[in-house]
Amino acid sequence: MALEMKTHKDIAAFEAKPMFGVTWRGLAAIAIMLLGGGVLFFGVASVVLTTSGTSWGAAVSAAMEGTDDPAVQALTRATSTGMYVMFPVLVPVAFWAWWRPMGLKPEIYAQYLFRHQLTSKVTHYEDTYSHTSVPSRSSRVDESVSSSGAGGFAQRAGAFFRRFRSRDARANRELSEHAQRPSRRSRGGR
């Protein structure tokens, strides 16, 4: 019997979950949300309560008694304003902790996204094998033979390579992936 062990598809994407099934990043986000969000909420709510002319103690005691007092309305307005201010501040923290676009952490995904958006999407290929025209035989001018005889050598080499070029072209015409009809000579034994 062999030992078996389950492994994750990508071991580098593994994140340890030390407490409550939450990663270190999640724990940091929860701490930021509780501390930072709490300070922000109570700060904004205190400002709203102070501008309406009441205090936390009077507003909370009136709400506990269940009276329809202006202090209760001020407390409702203050807590609602605190929530509206706190929400856009805490959403990016939650995205940072738990959002995994395409399995990547948000800061790594953002690098790829910005690089993709900022680079050009058209790839230009330069034609390195551009066609160069060869002058026709009638337009060629015979090179003058220099004292070292280099011009005559060039003409002889050109004629030599033209012979091979025509032989290669003939071979390419004969070799084809399509079946060709037999030539007239091979038909009927003639």
Image (cartoon, rainbow, N blue to C red):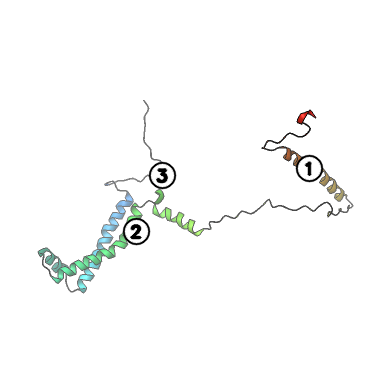
Specify few, some or many for label 2: CA neighbours under 10 Å numbering under 14, 14-19, or 20 or more. few
Disc 1 versus disc 2: distance between alpha carbons? 72 Å
The residue identified by callout 2 is: 92
Q: Quadrant of residue 61?
A: bottom left
Residue 104 % position (x, y): 40, 50
Asked if marks 3 and 2 touch (Cβ < 8 Å), the reply is: no
Residue 153 % position (x, y): 85, 47
Specify few, some or many for label 3: CA neighbours under 10 Å numbering under 14, 14-19, or 20 or more. few
Q: Amino acid at mark 2?
A: Pro
- 155 vs 54, nearest the viewer: 155
The residue identified by callout 1 is: 166
- 13 vs 119, nearest the viewer: 119
Q: SS of the residue at dot 2?
A: helix
The residue identified by callout 3 is: 12
Residue 41 % position (x, y): 25, 64
Q: SS of the residue at dot 1?
A: helix
Q: Amino acid at mark 1?
A: Ser
Disc 3 versus disc 2: distance between alpha carbons? 24 Å
Q: Amino acid at mark 3?
A: Ala
Q: Is residue 68 above or below residue 3?
A: below
Quadrant location of the N terminus in the rendered image:
top left
- 136 vs 149, nearest the viewer: 136
Residue drawn 28% across the image and 65% down it: 85
Residue drawn 73% across the image and 40% down it: 173
